[in-house]
Image: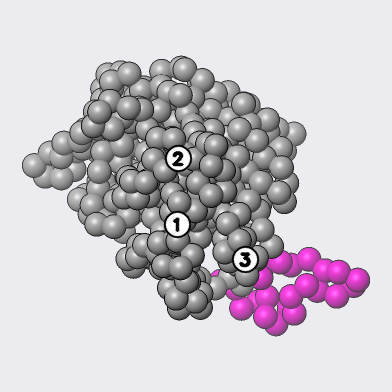
Amino acid sequence: MKFSKFVANIWHRGSKLALALLSAVTLSACNPAVLQGTATEVPQVVQGIISDPKTFNAILSQESPNVFGYTYEGLVRQNPITAKIKPSLAESWKFSEDNLRIVFTLREGLKWSNGEPLTADDVVFTYNDLIFNKEIPTNVRDSFRIGDSGKFPNVRKLDKRRIEFTLPEPFAPFLANTSVAIMPAHALRESVEKRDAEGKPVFISKWGVDTPPDEIIVNGRYKLESYSTSERVKFRRNPYYWEEDEQGNQLPYIDSVVWAILKNQDTSLLRFRSGDLDSLGVSPEYFSLLKREEKRANFRIYNGGPDYGTSFISFNLNKGSRNGKPLVPPEKSRWFNTL
């Protein structure tokens, strides 16, 4: 088993404190007729998650973990170990001398999972019609507000493969921020322009978890194959994915990935130790136990290095009532609703 390549191709978006990965020997013991110990011959990997996905629309996503690390890519991506920015859908980019103008060049021949071409039109649509659209609720938008004025970059198409971003002032995080998912204009533009009964863009309800998986168009390594509520999410390799290895073999090597939806981390640990899961994000309280078992149980722990995240406090601003009583005491509600 080529562990480094295996991990890079399944968990390229990052990891927790450590990643416990069953070795080829353990996998082979589970299904000796199929799994023979090389990455190119492993047809499926099973992982565990604690909760169901909330949406299959990457722009509307507000939770983590989510499916989009498998199904979508942006112009760039970040190496989870070194934190260096790497090309993704864009094969290159060039900054002007004053760092106010950046031109991205897309890879030639990019396609969506339905075989349609992925072009500069999709990039411009993603930014101008979705991310910068105030009618679309997305957590991504504020990442592109620049300076005290909070202005967005100007985004325009130069040709089929080139996109120009013009910034109001130099902005150090900009390049890393362009890792946001690029969405298919041909599949979603109409839903942005069309309104529902409340006058809101239909896009807001587009691609919920009740959407048939074959209707969801993606550009990432995997596409959705099936979803069973509270049971599993299954991903199938995207036949139109752009990346190849040094020998010209299309990536990813693994044909399918299954997310088993489990009750809690304790259940995940039990399922991993019994061989039902092929990998496990290791929390600190489990590390010592698994480290002791590592050699005997034939799995290997990988240190993914430090990770970053966001902590926040939310205040209930609901002015409604229930059973004749306010949901939030008026004296507390006034702390925020009168600002």
- Crowding at mark 2 (Cα within 10 Å: few <14, some 14-19, many 20+): some
How far is the residue under mark 3 from the one under mark 2?
25 Å
Instruction: Name the residue beneath numbered marker 1.
Output: 21
Q: Nearer the viewer, mark 3 or mark 2?
A: 2
The front one of 147 and 78 is 78
> Residue lying furthest right in this view?
323
Residue at 44 percent across and 35 percent down: it is 41
The front one of 241 and 179 is 241
In the image, residue 242 lies in the stretch drawn in magenta: no
Indicate which disc, 3 or 1, sits on the residue closer to the N terminus. Answer: 1
Instruction: Name the residue beneath numbered marker 2.
Output: 36
Q: Which element carries disc 1, helix, strand or loop?
A: strand
Indicate which disc, 2 or 1, sits on the residue closer to the N terminus. Answer: 1
Q: Nearer the viewer, mark 2 or mark 1?
A: 2
Residue at 39 percent across and 40 percent down: it is 39
- Crowding at mark 1 (Cα within 10 Å: few <14, some 14-19, many 20+): many
Snapshot colouring: one colour
Residue at 55 percent across and 37 percent down: it is 33
Query: Measured along the vertical axis of the image, is residue 126 above or below residue 168?
Result: above
Q: Are marks 3 and 2 in contact (CB under 8 Å)?
A: no
How far is the residue under mark 3 from the one under mark 1?
14 Å
Residue type (three-letter) at the residue carrying disc 1: Leu
Which quadrant would residue 308 be assigned to in this image? bottom left
**Residue 212, image x, y percentages:** 68, 30
In the image, residue 321 lies in the stretch drawn in magenta: yes
| Res 331 seen here | yes
**Residue 121, image x, y percentages:** 39, 23
Q: Which residues are magenta?
A: 316-339
The front one of 25 and 44 is 25
Instruction: Name the residue beneath numbered marker 3.
Output: 270
